[in-house]
Image (cartoon, rainbow, N blue to C red):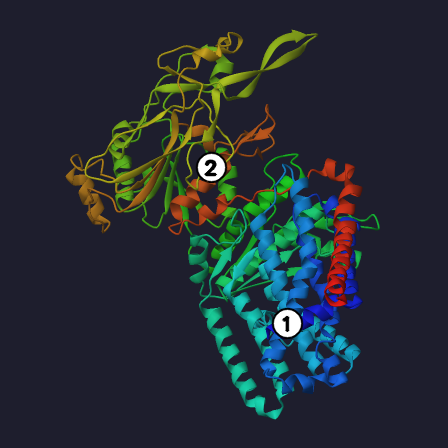
Amino acid sequence: MIRIFGKELNTFFSSLTAYIAIGVFLVITGLFLWVFPDYSLLDYCYATLDQFFDIAPWIFTFLIPAITMRTLAEEKQTGTIEFLVTKPLTIRDIVLGKYLACLALVAFAILPTLLYFYSISDLGSPKGNVDTGAILASYFGLLLLGGAYASIGLFTSSLTKNQIVAFMSAAFLCFFLHWGFYYISALPVFFGNSDAFVQSLGIENHYYSISRGVIDTRDLVYFLSVIIFFLGLTIAVLSGKKARKSLLILLGVLVCINIISSRFRGDLDLTEDQRYSLSAPVEGMLGAIQTDVTVKVFMTADFLPADYKRFKKAIAEKLDDFQAESSRVSYLFEDPNKGDPALVRNRAVALQRVGIKPFRAGKDRQGKDVYVFPAAVVEGADTVVVNLMVNDVPGAAPETVVNNSISLLEYNLADAIRRASFQSEKVIAFTEGHGELPAANVADMDRTLRAAGYAVGRLPLDKVDIIDPRIDLLVVAKPRTAFPEKDKFLIDQYVMGGGKVIWLLDRLTGSLDSMLMRNAYTPYDYPLNLEDQLFKYGYRIEPNIVMDFECTPVKLVTGDLGGAAQTEVFDWHFHPAAAPFSDNPIVKNLDRVQFRFASTVDTIATKKTDLKKTVLLRTSNYTMTKYAPFLLSFDLVTEKPPKEAFKRQNLPLAVLSEGVFPSAYEFKATSEMKGLLQSKGQEFRTSSVPTKMLVVGDGDIIKNDYDAEKKEVRGLGFDRVAQYTFANKDFLMNAIEYMLDDGNLVSAKNREVKLKLLDCTRAEEEKNYWRFINIVLPLILLLLFGFAYFYVRRMRFGR
């Protein structure tokens, strides 16, 4: 076999055919990647070789048959095949030797393309900003593809004496096995998950999987099976009828191995940010699905700008991962821009009615506006509409919006599939009866929760005898009057039964409205009567108001000019912009959260219970506190405190507790209270089952502004003076999802996708240099190798 291998390599490198084939391959890939605008890496500005790995299969479809067409056809034509068989070589040795020589030549052709990797690494912003693991995995996939094509080419070469026929047959078979099954799966005879099965028979499905940067055992087994099968076919053709039985046995074994590998799979995600590894909660959710789920994604297929092409590809890749985890999941892409103008318009209106809003992605080559619907409809036991493009930062660049959206894809899709598959609706209740925020001031949060599939209502504690255990979460949003013992007892026993509570509390009466009316006033305690209960749960909200050097602004009237008020913007230290200080999924990768007249939250050890306490939000390194009583006035703006006065740092503002809570009424529950429980079929508990509780030292964290005259609800977290939306809504939604989701699906929300960019300015300035490096230099190296090889042979055999 080794001698056949060496003989074939010498034959290849002694003829012009190999050099021409490799040269054409390098020229075509070089022109596509460094010159042609639709594919050029210099114009794409992303440090990735995705375009190379996309076009390489097309070029390989013709390159590799050109390499393999003569391997056995020429032997048959000249009659030397019989001479080889008479030597002490088996047919298997001959076939394997020739195959390995073809594979080595394919690897030799790929080798100069490593200059592409060097180029994007050098052009990276900063230098070296490339995903090396993903690119190496893609090269491995390309080598496997070359190996499969080489085995097909060797097989067709064994069937004929005519090299042209061998070339054309190999090119057709390579094309059919790569893309043919994909087109066959689109036929109307395939429905349900059968189309996905048909696609899995083709090479494209497995090559695409590896080219993402993931080595999957199913893909490895598939490629090895294709290679072994066609090498077996080649051996059978050369051996005659006696090998047919062995070939059938081989085919059966390969099918069984592939079936086993599909059931017991493993994968290795080589991407830097592990973006193709599903989080454990998502895997658990997908594994529990009991009904078929179809995801319809509305993205236009043509004329998408580069950023949106990347986004569409990321959606398909993530759904591929979902399909690999659960056979219940299928997906398809629909183009809402196709058809005559009236049809497109009607379709757009219909999509908007179900919550899918389009946005303008740019213009096509004819100058027409292209609109993208970056959303999906998930159909299962229920139908859920999910927006996949997340743009929380006004004016953000498209690449930033796309990158943020990609980082949230796993969570957004998984959450939509969960809601479409499992119809049990979580119930959230806002308490009433103690001066809590009215419905208008929590309308944005209410609307967001309902859109996320939660059932939301109001619970007047003074009018109920018991809190319904079917309520999953209780929100106490800025109460201002005292809680009677009866109401406190109801909440306590609700917690003991496993109920979750979010306390959003103001300890002191600070507000801008009060200051605008009186210019100055002294804050006082809200008489909430909750101190003892929170103390028992391990919390104490201090009677103070935080001042933070990192704060949001306020606009004040500073004078009058010709009857028009003059205003000026000042830093308002009583409105801290708090940053996350934890890796907890609630706040990981979260933006700043705006507080208004917040108080610090201290934690206290609890007896007989085991509670895990996590500080989610803190003040900055430059903080001071004012304890009641003190005078609150706008003079604090004009008399700007020096930074040195903010001596305290990282004071807790929001604390999460998880575990078993002691009852606040263990020794103070009256017989009347216990009798009330018994009349409702419940027992008095002195400690809770494991549950969760969140305490925030600011009731305004959930408050949205409301224009009563216009009946207009303004967005939660939006600051009109700063013209910026803080992450208040994200923080509260994450907290609710974390507290209610026992599978911790919200952890998938915190996946980070690192943007790999090129230095576009440098790429534009040095484009001719990089075109020389990647188009001309590989050809020069190929020529130098050829001259060196011929020179060595001449010196060796000329003697």
Q: Nearer the viewer, residue 746 or 204?
A: 204
Where is residue 335 drawn, in percent x and y? 70, 58
From the viewer's perspective, is the residue at label 1 or at label 2 nearer? 1
Q: Nearer the viewer, residue 520 or 203?
A: 203
Mark number, residue 5: 1
| SS for callout 1 | helix
Name the image quarter holding residue 213: bottom right
Q: Is the C terminus in the top left, top right, bottom left or bottom right quadrant?
A: bottom right
Residue at 56% over, 58% down: 319
Do we see residue 193 in this rendering?
no
Left/right of residue 525 with respect to residue 116 in the rendered view: left
Hey, what amino acid is under mark 2?
Phe
Do we see residue 503 in this rendering?
yes
Q: Are marks 1 and 2 in contact (CB under 8 Å)?
A: no
Which residue does the numbered mark 2 point to in the structure image?
731
The answer to which of marks 1 and 2 sits earlier in the sequence is 1
Hey, what amino acid is under mark 1?
Phe
| SS for callout 2 | helix
Where is residue 751 drawn, in percent x and y? 50, 45
Where is residue 279 drawn, in percent x and y? 46, 52
Residue at 62% over, 74% down: 3
Left/right of residue 577 with respect to residue 45 in the rendered view: left
Residue at 66% over, 83% down: 84
Mark number, residue 339: none
Count of marks, rendered view = 2
